[in-house]
Amino acid sequence: MGEIIIKSYQEHELNGIIQIDANVCKGCDSCKSFCPANAIDGAYGAVHHIDSTKCLQCGQCLVNCPFGSIKDTEDPLAEVIKKLDDPNITVVATIAPAVRVALGEEFGMEPGTLVTKQMYGALKKAGFKIMDVNFAADNTIMEEGTELIAKIEHYILGIPSEHEMGPLPQFTSCCPAWVRYMELYHPNLKDHLSSAKSPQGMAGPVVKIYGATEIWHTEPEKIYVVGVYPCTAKKLEASRPEFTAAANYWKKKGHTATYQDTDVVLTTRDLARLLKQKEIDLRMVEPATEQDNPMAEYTGAGTIFGVTGGVMEAALRTAYFVITGEELANLNLTPVRGLATVKEAEVSMKLKETEKEIVLKVAVVHGTKNIEPLLKQIENGTSPYHFVEVMNCPGGCVNGGGQPINPMGTSWLGTAKAILPWS
Amino acid sequence: MAQFDDQAVVLKHGLGTRVFHWGLVLGFLPTASTGIALWLRPFSGAGMHTVMQIHIIGAWVLSLACIYFFLFQYKRVVSFWREIFTWTKNDVEWMKVQGGYPQKIFLGKIVPVPAMRKMNSGQKMLGIIVFFGVILIAVSGWILYAALPAVPKEIAFYADKMHLILGLFITFCVVFGHIILGIYNWKEFVCMFGDGTMQVSEAAHHNALWVNEDIEVVKKG
Amino acid sequence: MKYNYVEKAIQVTRREFVALIGIAAAILWSGAYAVTDVVQDRNKYIKMRTMGLYKDDEKSTIRQSHHNKSLMDMYAKLAGKPLSPMAEELFHTTYIDRTKLA
């Protein structure tokens, strides 16, 4: 019987980002406990190995290995520094929400210290222009929220939509590890994913089209977008061959170049290394407010994208307003906050200009394995939800595979050991 | 005390002690040897897994033996503890001549050696090392075996370092000290691995103070 | 297994016994306490980073995405409105079945 080898990557996608160093690995099985895709081979005591075909590139194994044996092998520092040194290139850093509460840790600060202004200042000193991905997060809410509302109107309220749309429940699509999980392990359900790109997916086109013409007044080909994310899977996402919306847009206007929307991705750890290499100390650097930079304007809804429940809360703040015509009285939606692996909430909404009321049922899941029961419900036709947020990393992006490694912490949310050592 | 007749026999190591010692032997030897293999990693995949499985079996035996001894033979633990922490001038003098062993083994010379109790000074030193060392190895080993991944990474990292360093040190002391000298003193070897008895005259040579002050005639009835 | 002499019985007074149990209990209890403490705090860094972002939200003057002025400017100048043809082109995507990649 011939063995079907599933490649699972498109051409040009970065496919081997996370690797285990065989000289350091002790075969302790910690990494296996955290892997959402069962992508790690190796018996207890033997050197372990990541099967890239199954791997989501999420980096949870990397941040949880007690011996530091797992590495992010995509090191774009030299490339980025070369571009920064090139006077003809406008290098734009697009920075994710979760970076600003963790970057300080690489400079001796406590986790959670909000270093937004120092971060802006440090990036500017290094030669970057700034685009805050929180802006793109707000952008994502507008697109994904409008999509959700169209589906609610279409499926629940009987108002047919002119848009082509997938079925309910709608899943968020901002987490690239989660998206890859669906595409690889549950492709039959991929139409439930929101068609909206992630904030990274939107940031690139905004910078290379709107940023080029309205903000930095330069040729799109001369813009180099450096994503700064708490996430190793974002390196994979940026390399998706279909993410060339900016180049496609400009080709319609006579340009010829082809390039990715986001050229390269630095993790929070990578950025810290870059700043240190340039001898920029986050604690000493002149802070910058970027208050006159439209690309750095964001709302509270955008910034909470980095935590589990944050995308849901942001989406509900806008969906509630659009559906009811009124702002939520209490903007803090506590039922979707916290570290419980599956959180649920119900939001009653009275449709504007009518007496009709709908109850939106939502769920928030973190730790990809925890989505399986909800997927079973969908397959059985018994899913009670309209909208589900999924983040691969326990706690959300703040605990992403690209974040500073916290030696006294682990991602382990469970109470007991996941697997027996005898396996 | 009284003169002992040539044929008198003393019970030097009771059943509990000997059972525990067997537990240590059967637990320590496979654990230590597989421990070295886990450190040097000379095998690949399936081989290292088997090595780890043997290491765990040995560690379980060692752990259970210690728990048994501490719970059911606590008086021997108390006696051991008292002995290893009682150091007199005799012990200092014994250390100065290394118990007379190097002179006898390498030079064929017999030198005067101060009188010892049940444990000689070298054995007391190893006793201290092994008492604390095995406890720390067991604790760190159990963290690595049962507490990952819930235990923070830094704790696992230092537990692993401690486990390795102590493991190597104790293995060295036991293999190159205790085992060699234990076999060299063949009558002691037979006593510990056999029925625990020894001729009083033999015991009087190595453990004069113990024979004179710490033993008594078996009470009949 | 016949022998004439045996070691004198080991004397452990009641006080010494109680002291022994007390010390063992103290060591075991402090060890257990330290371990459970450290294990319970293992997610603390996640909670601290999370609080940082919720603080960023709390202190924002504008807390809903639909009130981001610059974003509205971008829509006005480039994409029109959400789900418009331009928005579909720039901000939306499709997904693939990775089990079918050659």
Image (spheres, rainbow, N blue to C red):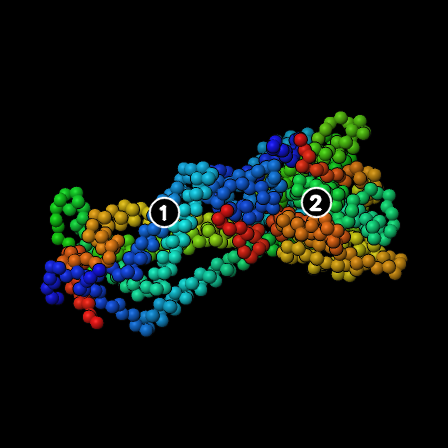
Q: Residue furthest right?
A: A353
Residue occupying image coordinates x 48% and y 40%: A47
Look at mark 2 in the image and give the residue it sits on.
A174
CA distance for labels 1 and 2 = 51 Å
> Mark 1: few, some, or many residues within 10 Å (few <14, many ≥20)?
some
The label nearer to you, 1 versus 2, is 1
Q: Position of residue A110 (x, y in %)?
A: 56, 53
Looking at numbered disc 2 in the image, what kind of residue is underneath it?
A: Cys
Residue occupying image coordinates x 62% and y 45%: A230
Q: Position of residue B23 (x, y in %)?
A: 34, 54
Q: Are marks 1 and 2 in contact (CB under 8 Å)?
A: no
Residues A114 and A200: in front is A200
Q: Position of residue A143 (x, y in %)?
A: 78, 45
Q: Quadrant of the N terminus of chain B?
A: bottom left
Residue A10 against residue A114 in the figure, above or below: above
Look at mark 1 in the image and give the residue it sits on.
B30
Q: Give the chain letter at badge 2.
A: A
Instruction: Answer with left or right where residue B107 lies relative to residue B189.
Output: left
